[in-house]
Image (spheres, rainbow, N blue to C red):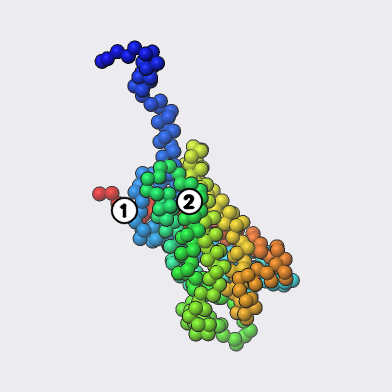
Amino acid sequence: APRVADPKQQLCLAASRLPTPPRCRRRRHRVAGVDSAMSPPPSGNQKPLPFINLFAASAFSACTAEILTLPLDTAKVRLQLQRGTTTKYKGLLGTMVTVAKEEGAGALWKGLEPGLHRQVVNGGLRIGLYEPVRNFYVGKDHVGDAPLLKKIAAGLTTGAIAICVASPTDLVKVRMQSEGKLPEGVKKKYPSALAAYRIIAREEGLLGLWTGLGPNVARNAIINAAELASYDQIKSSLLASGLFKDNVVTHIASGLGAGFFAVCIGSPVDVVKSRVMGDKEGRFKGVLDCFVRTAREDGLSAFYKGFLPNFYRLGSWNVAMFLVLEQARKVVAPKSA
């Protein structure tokens, strides 16, 4: 080999032949592992799931969480629809007890049928599309954890797309949940979800099924971004710390964090959505009118009416949904040959 006269050149040549320090190799492996272990993306070195598999796992997980937590949602809607000084419903448990006492325990699951319709369509799309859309935003050549803003953008996008398709199911669910105890001999206006779709379309026109679409898109996009992006970020941060493993404890902690952020950010829009969709007398002229009248008549605190039941609902919903989703993804993952 030719000799190098310059001592500096000799030093550089020797340094270039040194192996990469083990600590550096471990660091690179850990960072790369964070991206593959994030959730909703799959754990380990698995290939991305096909969309139909993601949709099936997401829809099943969302429906399971809906069944488990619907009584909390019913209580939340009743509290949000209270206006002025009306205090028929007091607190989460008080509301549930009052509804069960006056209307029967089954009333706590009012709206389950359209709720499941909603979760199949909305849950399947907003959760199932999140990973493909997020990966599209970061680009196929991206290495490492996706930037938080990209995660938020993906959540906003999939939440808005999903609810544009599923909004009629949400409207029927709110209408059925808001229907309280009726006088004896008075028939229910909406005897079933399918009947409700027909009645609303006949009385309010086909577009009436998309009543409240504006606040619903805003609410769904915001809450979806808060839920999925925060779960994604919290879980990947916990795993990157080296103190947590990809297990149930991490999933529960990430799910509770996702529910908390979703309620803090989305509660005002959620209140307006419930009031606009539950407005059968035409009291509000639109979303802005509902915001203004709610603030003027009930005060700004009204936008966080039912905050605790909303958190109990979304926190428990997210924990249940993500726990089931993590397992469902493994079930629908294509088997290796």
- Element under disc 1: loop
Which residue does the numbered mark 2 point to in the structure image? 150
- Where is residue 262 drawn, in percent x and y? 57, 57
Q: Locate residue 311: give its quadrant.
A: bottom right
- Is 40 drawn above or below residue 26 in the view shown? below
Residue 107 showing in the rendered view: no
| Residue 63 or residue 4, whichever sits in front | 4
Mark toward the start of the polypeptide (1 vs 2): 2
- Where is residue 306 drawn, in percent x and y? 65, 63
Give the number of the mark in front: 1 or 2.
2
Residue at x-position 47% and y-position 59%? 157
In the rendered image, which quarter contains the N terminus? top left
| Residue 200 or residue 12, whichever sits in front | 12
Residue at x-position 53% and y-position 73%? 171
The extreme front residue here reads 6
Residue type for callout 1? Pro
Answer few, some or many: residues within 10 Å of disc 2's Cα (few below 14, many 20 plus, some between 14 and 19). some
- Where is residue 273 drawn, in percent x and y? 59, 69
Which residue does the numbered mark 1 point to in the structure image? 334
